[in-house]
Image: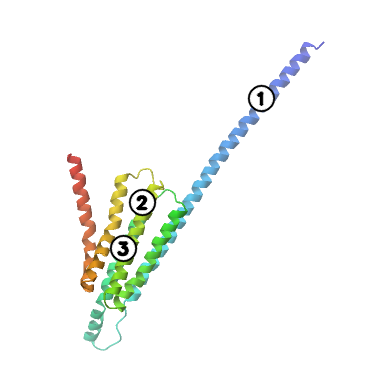
Amino acid sequence: MTSRSGYDGCENEGRIAQTHLNDYHLGDRSSYAMGESEAEGQATGTETEGMARLAGFSDGVFAIAITLLILNIEVPESTASAAVAVAQVIREWPDVLSYVISFLVIGNYWIVHHSIFEDVDSYDRRFLWLNVVYLMFIAFIPFSTSLLGDVPGRFPVIVYAGTLTLTSIVLAVLWRYAWTYELLDGTVDGEKVRDVTAGILTPAVVFAGSILVSFVSAQLAMYSWLLLLFADSARERLLRERNRSGETR
């Protein structure tokens, strides 16, 4: 017959074993939760590092492309006559004009690209490839700019305007892709997506229109690019009027 003290001893041992078992499971759950938290932190860190590398690579392409533009302008030959030097500089006016326009256009593309990446929270492989295609057109701009000064006629105007038209279209596709596949910050709404898309495609409208003008006059087509100086302000004025009319309804 089992004694009372023996029974109590077994009961105490059972309680101790159960306590250890509970502690073990609690520690297991805590370790699992900590593991999940660490994994999420590592994933966020990796994603942030990836975005930084993507932005850094893009900025590098922009910096090189915008710097190469100046190489299209030839330095006047050494001459003792100031009048001859001035005449040589004046002959370079197509190169100077295309340099100024290309510099401002690439600068505008960089600003828009930078603004887009401020709203991008994550990315996928297709987003990366779209960005690469966009940068490919950016890197092509110095070459198409050099054609304007070296090759007469309509052809260089069409190549230049076509390059910038496609550049704007690819950037718009990149932006819309990020919105469609929820790669943007949650605060971005449909109205902002439409406004940014309109801003991206504004240069495309100007340059595509200049291609048609080039069949009448190549020089007139180049002058039409100056509309870009007023296009953004006109678009912003239209947006303000639209918002004002929406508030009064």
Q: Residue at x 24, y 88 (%)?
A: 81
Which residue type does callout 3 highlight? Thr
In the shown orientation, is residue 175 left or right of residue 211? right
Residue 130, percent from left and from top: 41, 57
Mark 3–mark 2 distance (CA, rounded to whole Å): 17 Å
Q: Residue at x 39, y 51 (%)?
A: 177
- The quadrant of the rendering that contains the C terminus is top left
Numbered mark located on residue 19 in the image: 1
Mark 2–mark 1 distance (CA, rounded to whole Å): 57 Å
The residue beneath circle 3 is 165
Q: Looking at this view, is 220 or 19 the one in front?
A: 220
Which residue type does callout 2 highlight? Arg
Q: Residue furthest right?
A: 1
- The quadrant of the rendering that contains the N terminus is top right
Instruction: Please tell me whether mark 3 or mark 1 is closer to you in this view.
Output: 3
Q: Residue at x 64, y 27 (%)?
A: 22
- Helix, strand or loop for disc 1: helix
Numbered mark located on residue 176 in the image: 2
- Helix, strand or loop for disc 3: helix
